[in-house]
Image: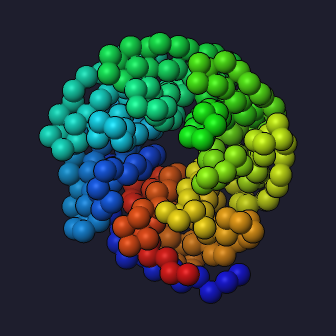
Amino acid sequence: MSQVKVERIHTLTGHRDCIYTLQGSSEEHTFFSGSGDGMVVRWNLQDPETGDVIAKLPNSVYALHHHPYTDLLIAGHNYEGIHILSWKNKKEISSLQLTKAAIFDIQHLGKNDLLVASGDGVLSKVRMDQLVITKKNQASEKSARTIAVNEVTGDIAVGYSDNFIRVFDEDLILKAEWQAHANSVFTLRYMPESNLLMSGSRDARLKVWDGDVGYSQAAEIVAHMYAINHIDFSADGKHFVTCSMDKSIKVWDTEALTLLKVIDRARHAGHGTSVNKLFWTSYNNQLLSASDDRTISVWHIIF
């Protein structure tokens, strides 16, 4: 492994339950967290010690998404649908009773549409300005866990708990499907400026699929000991990180798919329980990690 240097520079506390999601904003130093305590919290990396609660929802928040065209924050409220938040004013603008199932992921599609993945296996398309459901596709009876949108081709890749990845067009018409893993697909990301799709699963495997040749498998790595919960890329796309139920974070070279660094409790005073979400900011190249241990760690990574 190369001489990557890692330093934990902050530990952010205040949530009273597992932290499931992290999300950036229109300001590179500002980000949000969502937790099992129902709180949506705004943090400032310029003054990181104290979070600011912008919403308190009755149930767990598994998904947050910043809508770049309106600068609004969308929270996926477990069993209640989505809530549109003005994070600067700490005010809820509107909400939509979308599903009684858990909401696991939210992404945007162009300027006007949201995509929502839920525990009933439904992928929903929601018109942002009118807050109405315009399309639904239930491709599985198992949970839809993660969404990745290819902004170049328009492909929408969704990972499911039936071990499949399914790819849809912008009208949610199924284009391709295949059993990708031996267990639930928890995280998907298209590589920057590429038609290569990266997947992480409960089977601890990291795989790459080539969208230019029918999503054939291009690579497979036994990346962790237990489930891979999330993947995120550095701002320049040259590196990516994975996190796992094995309590570790791993830093990788994107082009070579080689492991560069392991961040864990023994070597770096890392998290003591499952690491659920990552967010690699453009603010001083700081990496954020959220865990079942109710904390957010802020890491400085030097290559």
Residue located farthest toward the front when viewing the structure as drawn = 152
- Tell me where residue 46 sits by quadrant: bottom left
Please provide percent x and percent y for residue 138: 63, 16
Residue at (21%, 26%) from the top-left corner?
Answer: 93
Between residue 196 and residue 296, name the one nearer to us: 196
Q: Nearer the viewer, residue 235 or 227?
A: 235
Is 21 rendered above or below residue 301? above
The percent coordinates of residue 16 (x first, y second) are 33, 49
Nearer to the camera, 74 or 52: 74
27 shown above or below 110:
below
**Where on the picture, by quarter, is residue 184?**
top right
Quarter of the image that includes the N terminus: bottom right
Does any portion of residue 38 appear in the rendered image?
no
Q: Position of residue 182 (x, y in %)?
A: 81, 40
Residue 19 spot, x, y in % from top left:
42, 49
Above or below for 263 versus 199? below
